[in-house]
Image (cartoon, helix red, strand yellow):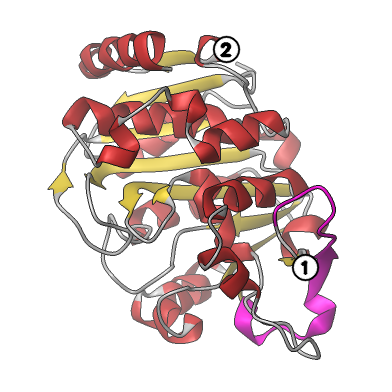
Amino acid sequence: MKSRGKEVFLIKTEDRDFGIKSLLNQFDLKNYSGKRVALKANFNSAHPFPASTHLDTLNVLVKILKNAKISDLTLAERSGMGNTREVLEQMGIFNLSKKMNFKVVVLDEEDEKGWVKIDGNEIHWPRGFFISKVFLDADKVVQTCCLKTHRFGGHFTLSLKNSVGLVANNVPGVSYDYMGDLHESPHQRVMIAEINKFYNVDLVIMDAIKAFVNKGPELGDIVEPNLLLASKDRIAIDAVGIAILRSYGSTMEVMNGRIFKLDQIHRAAELGVGVKSAADIKLTPLNDESHNITNEIKHILKKQG
């Protein structure tokens, strides 16, 4: 089955191996054969899931990509809370990379040749920003994100917000703090969306087996939706993620207003990153257990999208 970009597949399970395999069976991975794949996970800090990507999620995802006969796989990351190398070490990523034979790039340690400058024209970044070449040079980009709120101005951190971790804080030879521009700006959420205009994503896996419904990104009150989701469309999967948070009750910033008027979603849609409205999303449950929550999400998207 070849899926379209606007589809979001959903499965209710606590079994990541079963769930992620079921999701990826909905996509044609034959065209991944021989391709160089860049992987963006969520390792902003060394706090456990749902703050960070669960190691089991990464393990299953890498195994499936390897079985698709990709030529090589590179996980690249910049942590915003803590030293990236130490975060990845604590989370077991280097051990996993040795076991499963994939490359890990610590973006903080990249020299100036590892970055591409994005000009600041027509975006809210006053001096533009630098994006990792790993994701621009790859044949395929795969992202896995968590489901959580963000109390430091992002409001929520799903696939669009996860892109901040492939943008430079500082670049060797350039004396400037680009993350300072982001975190001090009243346009922070719009700027988050704008990153996504400048790189492609071929597949997103959202691990919503657990989620933070408040605070975030590294702590908060936890709920257990026991859901895994997949899509080719960052906006579609984020809109569904917000609907899931709303189904539990979340922060004022997440709960209030139409989903496609929220800054991250609205700006990303405006820039053509993905779907432009909730009506464009096709939500497909993959097991009987996921039908009830799918109907609830559809209702929220219809009434509040």
- Mark 1 surroundings within 10 Å by alpha-carbon count, few (fewer than 14), some (14 through 19), many (20 or more): some
Q: Which residue is mark 2?
A: 280
For marks 1 and 2 on the same chain, the one whose residue lies earlier in the sequence: 1
The picture quadrant where one finds residue 218 is: bottom left
For the record, the magenta segment spans 107-124
Q: With respect to residue 70, does 227 lie above or below?
A: above
> Which residue occupies 33% across, 59% down?
217
- Mark 2 surroundings within 10 Å by alpha-carbon count, few (fewer than 14), some (14 through 19), many (20 or more): few
Could you say where residue 1 lies in the image, as x and y percent from the top left? 60, 16
Could you say where residue 294 lies in the image, as x and y percent from the top left? 31, 15
Q: Is residue 109 magenta?
A: yes
The local secondary structure at tag 1 comes to: loop
Q: Is residue 285 left or right of residue 8?
A: left
Q: Is residue 25 left or right of residue 268?
A: left
Q: Which residue is mark 1?
A: 127
Q: Is residue 26 magenta?
A: no
Amino acid type of the residue tagged 1 in the rendering:
Arg
